[in-house]
Amino acid sequence: MTAVDDLSFEIARGEVVGFLGPNGAGKTTTLRVLCGFLSATGGDVRIAGHDVRTESLAVRRRIGYLPENCPLYPEMRVDEYLRYRAALKGVPAGRVRERVAAVKQQCGLNDAGRRIIGQLSKGYRQRVGMADALVHEPEILILDEPTIGLDPGQIRQTRDLIRALAQRHTILLSTHILPEVEAVCRRILILHRGRLAADGDAGRLCRRQVCVIEIVGAGPGAGEAFAALDGVASATDEDAGDALRVTLCCRDGADPREAAARLAVERGWRLREARLQTQSLEDVFVALTRTAPAPPAGAREGGR
């Protein structure tokens, strides 16, 4: 079964990018490929100019990865664990104490250094995982559901931490919490069925303008007819009782209502409504992940 199909994107230094998609879309597989934990069966994956397949150690030195279920050693104390992880990640012996103190300060763990990890709350264990991801001063942070299972106060603290980290790191943030993406990300990637369904500026995607057309008497192919109009990037349709509702994604601020009304008259369809509306990120996410096509059978997993 194909997990990721012909996925291609680039992230510039200093960007904070939200990585969205429904369950099973291929997000975690993609993150594991980027980190070198899984090998893609095709394509080219490069991190900071290094090939993930042939220069994996150079790549891992530049990445801090927080997986969805952070694997910690529950019998170790926080300080002990962070010192151990710092040594594993190649932090010079003379800097280990300094780096552990720094990441404890960043992640709100100053009062937890002597505590046993297995006795910590979910929120504190997430902080330990984040400190682990930061201890070797990576250029790039890859965060997979960093606030999953946290209470609202802990989510806010983690969000504030990510904002602070964004000033010094390139960040790829995978999450199901859309307000979190709106709050901290400048760019958004939406993955569906292993393919990239959207890649755009967060501000535009969070306030995307669409034209909603409702017509009576239209047969099959109405959506395709509207999609061919000037100023329309794409069109989706759905039954609306005795009518057909077509949502047109506008290109570059275009207003296709006049052209849509003309098309309806030419085709003999009765136009019931034509209005512009602004979609939220949730609207965009639902629309894209509901209508994006499935990848072709037999396609290979890969990325660039």
Image (cartoon, rainbow, N blue to C red):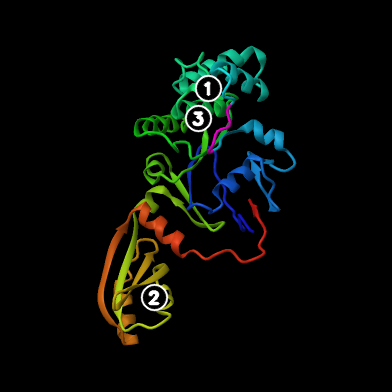
What residue occupies the far right of the structure in this picture? 54
Residue 179: image x %, image y %?
Answer: 36, 44
Mark positioned earlier in the residue sequence (3 or 1): 1
Q: Which residues are magenta?
A: 68-72
Mark identifier at residue 226: 2
Residue type beneath disc 2: Phe
Q: Quadrant of residue 121?
A: top left
Q: Which residue is mark 3?
A: 168
Residue 253 vs residue 110, the one in the foreground: 110
129 inside magenta stretch: no
Using a 10 Å C-alpha cutoff, classify the residue at mark 2 as few (fewer than 14 neighbours), some (14 to 19) or many (20 or more). Answer: many
- Residue 137 falls left or right of residue 271: right
- From the viewer's perspective, is residue 55 above or below residue 138? below
Mark positioned earlier in the residue sequence (3 or 2): 3
Residue 153 vs residue 72, the one in the foreground: 72
Residue 185: image x %, image y %?
Answer: 43, 42
Q: Which residue is mark 1?
A: 117
Using a 10 Å C-alpha cutoff, classify the residue at mark 3 as few (fewer than 14 neighbours), some (14 to 19) or many (20 or more). Answer: some
Residue type beneath disc 3: Arg
Residue 299: image x %, image y %?
Answer: 66, 62
Q: Considering the image in quadrants, where does the N terminus appear?
A: bottom right
